[in-house]
């Protein structure tokens, strides 16, 4: 085949401090899973500039209320987690499917792989879904997840967090991330959180305690806004022949 | 123009099935009884050659006519297809294996108007991946279209080869090798 265009390559070393690297040896699981060849930068075509339009799922109220998915109330501190999903241009992303999953109040996941010695809660599975409204707002009711130990290094503990999955307006904007809680004392010790070198970027993963979201006699409120965007389309270097 | 700073990525971790599998999005983009149905499967492997059993693979593709089910694809001369969204996801719990039942996509134009060969975009998430990795899968019975595909043409031969699936027993096989010999070619997103 004739080589018509040469695409540029980008390695972890070229990332801004606000981006997540692929290889971050302090997070041991990246050592054998991070691709080590630089990523190929291709201009975004219609394939990349489109993506699943997800607003048409028939979700019910209990999909967004993780405290009402079983016969009884789960143990733990009831919380409301809400925020807006925005494009990098500030526009609200409406009709977006937002998916979350988390540990229970004791820090245990309802998952066969999680075997640490904390109790499961028969009234809590830890998965939720909702669709953003016209203002880009999502809202979940759940319980405060517990911190939990993991095998990354001696005495390793994950800060409390909720996993978030979002789609954006294009395949390039797809994002899975984690929301943390303000003031967590485990932040300095967590390699996943600290894989993002820029402190301000890390802070964007920390929710804000919001008194105005807190419901009297019922639940604490936390706000977590999410901004989605792809990288800028990169112009071609070619065409040229080898 | 004021740009809001993006929310950074974090790993999906080992428990992603709680939130992402058994929901409204499945690995069946069409019914298996659809005469056009094709089966695509493969394994996700790490740098030691071990299967990644706690990951998730997602695909995004055009319909059989080459139209993407998204408002940005406004080529009304190419028909949309009721019920075909072009998106699917599969876990890799079974020995790192993922599987999709879908249709072969039609050709979609590239940025300069040339037609791309039929392809799927593929995203992989897992514990140990701090962000999604993304690649493309091409079809082994499209040698002519592959030979003029603007993305494949811009790659080195050793980068191109891992992106073409192989035909096996009436199905398509596409392995994702995250690291090491034969590493899959991944694209910046």
Image (tube, grey):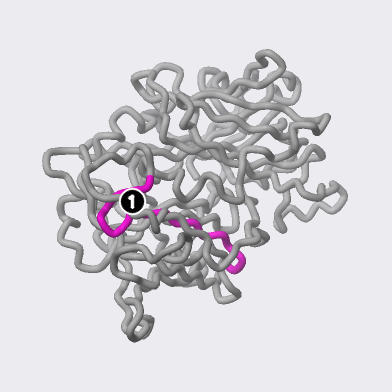
Task: Give the labeled residue for mark 1.
Answer: A16
Q: Quadrant of residue B117?
A: top right
Of residues A196 and A59, the one nearer the viewer is: A59
Please tell me which residue is depicted at 38% across the width and 54% down the height of the picture: A122
Q: Quadrant of residue A198?
A: bottom left
* Placement of A70 over or under B26, stated as above or below: below
Please tell me which residue is depicted at 36% across the width and 45% down the height of the picture: B11
Residue range (magenta): A93-110
Which chain is home to disc 1? A
Is residue B141 toward the left or the right of residue A67 in the image?
right
Please tell me which residue is depicted at 63% across the width and 51% down the height of the picture: A52
Whether residue B129 is visible? no
**Residue extending farthest top:** B169
Q: Position of residue B24 (x, y in %)?
A: 61, 51
Please tell me which residue is depicted at 74% across the width and 32% down the height of the picture: B32
* Placement of B159 over or under A114, stated as above or below: above
Of residues A16 and B112, the one nearer the viewer is: A16
* Placement of A206 over or under B156, stated as above or below: below
> Is A104 a magenta residue?
yes
Q: Position of residue A153 (x, y in %)?
A: 16, 38
> Is A217 a magenta residue?
no
Is residue A212 toward the left or the right of residue B27 in the image?
left
């Amino acid at each position: 085949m004739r080589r018509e265009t040469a695409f540029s390559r980008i390695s972890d070393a070229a990332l801004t401090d606000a981006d997540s690297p692929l290889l971050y040896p302090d997070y041991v699981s990246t050592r054998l899973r991070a691709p080590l060849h630089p990523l190929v930068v291709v201009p975004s075509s219609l394939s990349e500039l489109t993506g699943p339009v997800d607003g048409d799922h028939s979700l019910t109220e209990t999909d967004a209320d993780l405290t009402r998915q079983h016969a009884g109330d789960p143990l733990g501190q009831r919380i409301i987690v809400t925020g807006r999903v925005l494009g990098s241009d500030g526009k609200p992303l409406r009709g977006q499917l937002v998916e979350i999953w988390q540990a229970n109040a004791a820090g245990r996941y309802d998952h066969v792989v999680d075997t640490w010695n904390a109790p499961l809660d028969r009234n809590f599975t830890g998965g939720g879904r909702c669709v953003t409204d016209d203002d880009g707002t999502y809202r979940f009711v759940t319980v405060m997840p517990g911190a939990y130990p993991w095998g990354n290094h001696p005495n390793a503990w994950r800060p409390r967090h909720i996993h978030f999955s979002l789609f954006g307006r294009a395949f390039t904007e797809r994002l899975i991330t984690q929301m943390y809680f303000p003031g967590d004392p485990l932040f300095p010790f967590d390699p996943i959180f600290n894989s993002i070198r820029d402190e301000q970027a890390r802070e964007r993963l920390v929710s804000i305690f919001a008194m105005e979201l807190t419901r009297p006699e019922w639940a604490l409120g936390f706000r977590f806004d999410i901004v989605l965007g792809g990288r800028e389309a990169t112009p071609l270097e070619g065409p040229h022949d080898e | 123009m004021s740009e809001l700073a993006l929310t950074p990525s974090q790993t999906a971790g080992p428990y992603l099935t709680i939130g992402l599998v058994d929901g409204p999005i499945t690995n069946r983009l069409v019914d298996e009884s659809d005469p056009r149905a094709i089966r695509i499967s493969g394994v996700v492997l790490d740098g030691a050659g071990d299967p990644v059993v706690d990951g998730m693979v997602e695909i995004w593709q055009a319909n059989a006519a080459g139209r993407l089910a998204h408002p940005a694809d406004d080529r009304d001369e190419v028909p949309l297809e009721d019920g075909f969204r072009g998106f699917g996801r599969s876990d890799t719990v079974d020995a790192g294996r993922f599987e999709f039942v879908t249709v072969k996509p039609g050709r979609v134009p590239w940025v300069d108007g040339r037609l791309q060969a039929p392809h799927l975009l593929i995203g992989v998430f897992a514990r140990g991946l701090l962000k999604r990795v993304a690649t493309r899968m091409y079809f082994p019975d499209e040698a002519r279209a592959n030979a003029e595909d603007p993305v494949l043409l811009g790659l080195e031969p050793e980068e191109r080869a891992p992106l073409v699936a192989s035909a096996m027993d009436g199905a398509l096989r596409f392995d994702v090798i995250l690291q090491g010999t034969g590493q899959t070619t991944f694209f910046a997103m």
